[in-house]
Image (cartoon, grey):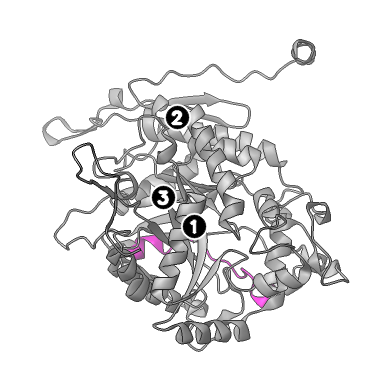
């Protein structure tokens, strides 16, 4: 499929019209750690992931490469604790460099922004560990300094090791995490959207007025989880609210995503497993009064690209040689709560009931215990073969044409809008994407052409929704907190035991 447009059925007068193909959005997927989704590849002579901590050079060089390829965004994952489910210990996580050590993804952003004009940045940050005010201040500042190129990947933290690191014994229960996160987002909307008018900054030297205080509103919030009485301390940034990503397709995660997220990050091993989840997300978004097509879905995707099939296969075999099988099992065990080291039979089928840990990612557990044509049975042997390269997501090995075919299949069968492209080696995988895959996608009319250097830069949100859409869409819940429509809410009042009994009786 190489034509720019697919023909439409003939019209009444016998002519045909052309329907533009769905444009594919590509994010580069990285993490401030040597072993992201393909642990062990640091052993390759061409890999530079071990230099991430040495200086800013790794990050600025990567940003310039992605800018050259017209990549939508650099999506930076993060985690706040090590994986200690495998063998009930952190040892193998540390030993294999399985997302360990871990730097702060916020720190390199400003440096990367100075060497790019169009590349957006998606930064992972948790709603579990800091007050909303601090996160609002940081993201507003970044949105200013990058001229609106900031996105936030919203996560609710689940690792026991992460909670222990900040002095708490146990993580918050799964569904309660999302209830807390919902309030967190609503506090942020108040700060970002309701606290300042566009005309608050006066800059009047003659009258010694910098700001008009009547145009800056104090936000008073008294909720179930958060208390706050303050105006936002940063003036409105280009987007006000950063572009909002969210990961997770559990029931609570889907409810949260379809309320707050503009893009949902998903991971699955087969489009047949993912398709019903995407369909559910879009249906929920529509029920909430949102355009279901405006909810963009990004799937994990790991390409191994060669100029020939033989070259791609050789790269894959090299990756297999360097792969840390134990490192992959550490990640799988941590994500799913299944200590796979306890399986004596390598061909025993893995099921949800094998997950003994309370703290895990439910959507990943579901994805990687659900069979498909690609994986009829999940067993320790299958996990060992697949977990060390690409984090159990799809790995496409072939020429740019073959990889583009596979991407089109996922778009067609799962209704995804784009991909978070994970690397095997860095920057090698990203170089192949920029030099080989992007030109092939452009040849098919599936990827935007490179903007001229003189063209005005677009914000992160405009790159997804189009020129002029700098702020949240009108059908997004965050617009209910705009300055001119904002109404301060009544303080939260805990339900009494009698009210709870009455509610149960009515139900």
Query: Residue 461 has which mark?
Result: none
Q: Secondary structure at mark 3?
A: strand
Q: Is residue 56 visible?
A: no
On screen, residue 490 above or below 197: above
Q: Image point 61% across, 66% down: which residue?
A: 391
Earlier in the chain: of badge 1 and badge 3, it is 3
Query: Residue 410 has which mark?
Result: 1
Where's residue 447, x and y in %?
A: 31, 60
Locate residue 300 relative to residue 432 in the image: left or right.
Answer: right
Q: Is residue 435 magenta?
A: no
418 or 115, nearer to the observer: 418
404 or 87, nearer to the observer: 404
Please report the bounds of the magenta region as a residue range: 94-112
Mark 1 surroundings within 10 Å by alpha-carbon count, few (fewer than 14), some (14 through 19), many (20 or more): many
Give the quadrant of residue 244. Answer: top left
- Looking at the rendered image, the quarter that the N terminus falls into is bottom left
Mark 2 surroundings within 10 Å by alpha-carbon count, few (fewer than 14), some (14 through 19), many (20 or more): some
Numbered label tally: 3
Q: Secondary structure at mark 1?
A: helix
Quote the CA–CA distance across marks 3 and 2.
Answer: 17 Å
- Looking at the rendered image, the quarter that the C terminus falls into is top right
Locate residue 126 relative to residue 22 in the image: left or right.
Answer: right
Q: Image point 41% across, 75% down: which residue?
A: 58
Where's residue 172, x and y in %?
A: 71, 42
Locate residue 358 relative to residue 486 in the image: left or right.
Answer: right
Name the residue beneath numbered marker 2. 477
Q: Image point 41% across, 47% down: which residue?
A: 139
Query: Residue 151 has which mark?
Result: 3
Q: Main SS of the magenta segment?
A: loop
Quote the CA–CA distance across marks 1 and 3.
Answer: 24 Å
């Amino acid at each position: 499929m190489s034509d720019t447009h697919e023909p439409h059925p003939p019209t009444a007068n016998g002519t045909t019209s052309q329907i533009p193909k769905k444009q594919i959005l590509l994010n580069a997927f990285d993490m401030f750690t040597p072993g992201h989704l393909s642990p062990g590849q640091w052993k390759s002579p061409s890999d530079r992931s071990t230099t991430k901590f040495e200086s800013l050079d790794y990050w600025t060089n990567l940003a310039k490469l992605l800018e050259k390829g017209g990549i939508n965004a650099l999506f930076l994952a993060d985690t706040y604790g090590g994986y200690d489910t495998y063998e009930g210990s952190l040892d193998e996580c540390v030993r294999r460099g399985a997302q360990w050590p871990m730097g702060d993804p916020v720190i390199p952003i400003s440096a990367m922004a100075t060497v790019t004009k169009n590349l957006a940045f998606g930064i992972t940050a948790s709603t579990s560990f800091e007050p909303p005010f601090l996160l609002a201040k940081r993201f507003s500042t970044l949105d200013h300094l990058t001229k609106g190129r900031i996105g936030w990947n919203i996560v609710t933290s689940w690792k026991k090791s992460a909670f222990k690191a900040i002095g708490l014994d146990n993580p918050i229960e799964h569904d309660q995490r999302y209830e807390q996160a919902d309030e967190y987002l609503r506090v942020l909307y108040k700060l970002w959207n309701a606290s300042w008018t566009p005309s608050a900054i006066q800059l009047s030297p003659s009258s010694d007025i910098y700001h008009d205080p009547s145009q800056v509103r104090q936000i008073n919030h008294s909720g179930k989880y958060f208390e706050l009485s303050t105006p936002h301390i940063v003036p409105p940034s280009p987007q006000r609210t950063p572009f909002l990503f969210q990961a997770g397709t559990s029931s609570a995660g889907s409810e949260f995503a379809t309320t707050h997220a503009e893009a949902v990050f998903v991971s699955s091993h087969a489009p047949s497993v993912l398709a019903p989840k995407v369909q559910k997300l879009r249906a929920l978004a529509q029920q909430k009064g949102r355009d279901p097509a405006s909810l963009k879905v990004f799937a994990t995707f790991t390409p191994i690209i060669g100029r020939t099939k033989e070259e791609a296969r050789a790269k894959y075999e090299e990756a297999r040689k360097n792969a840390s099988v134990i490192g992959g099992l550490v990640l799988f065990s941590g994500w799913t709560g299944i200590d796979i080291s306890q399986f004596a039979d390598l061909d025993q089928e893995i099921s949800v009931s094998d997950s003994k840990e309370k703290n895990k990612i439910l959507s990943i557990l579901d994805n990687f215990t659900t069979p498909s044509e690609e994986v009829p049975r999940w067993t320790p042997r299958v996990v060992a073969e697949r977990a060390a390269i690409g984090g159990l997501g799809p790995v496409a090995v072939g020429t740019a044409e073959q990889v583009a075919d596979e991407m089109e299949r996922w778009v067609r069968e799962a209704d995804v809008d784009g991909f978070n492209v994970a690397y095997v080696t860095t920057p090698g995988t990203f170089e192949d994407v920029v030099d080989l895959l992007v030109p092939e996608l452009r040849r098919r009319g599936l990827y935007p052409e490179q903007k001229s250097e003189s063209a005005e830069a677009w914000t992160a949100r405009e790159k997804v929704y189009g020129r002029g859409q700098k702020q949240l869409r009108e059908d997004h819940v965050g617009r209910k907190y705009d300055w001119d429509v904002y109404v301060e809410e009544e303080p939260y009042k805990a339900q009494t035991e009698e009210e709870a009994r009455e509610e149960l009786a009515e139900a």
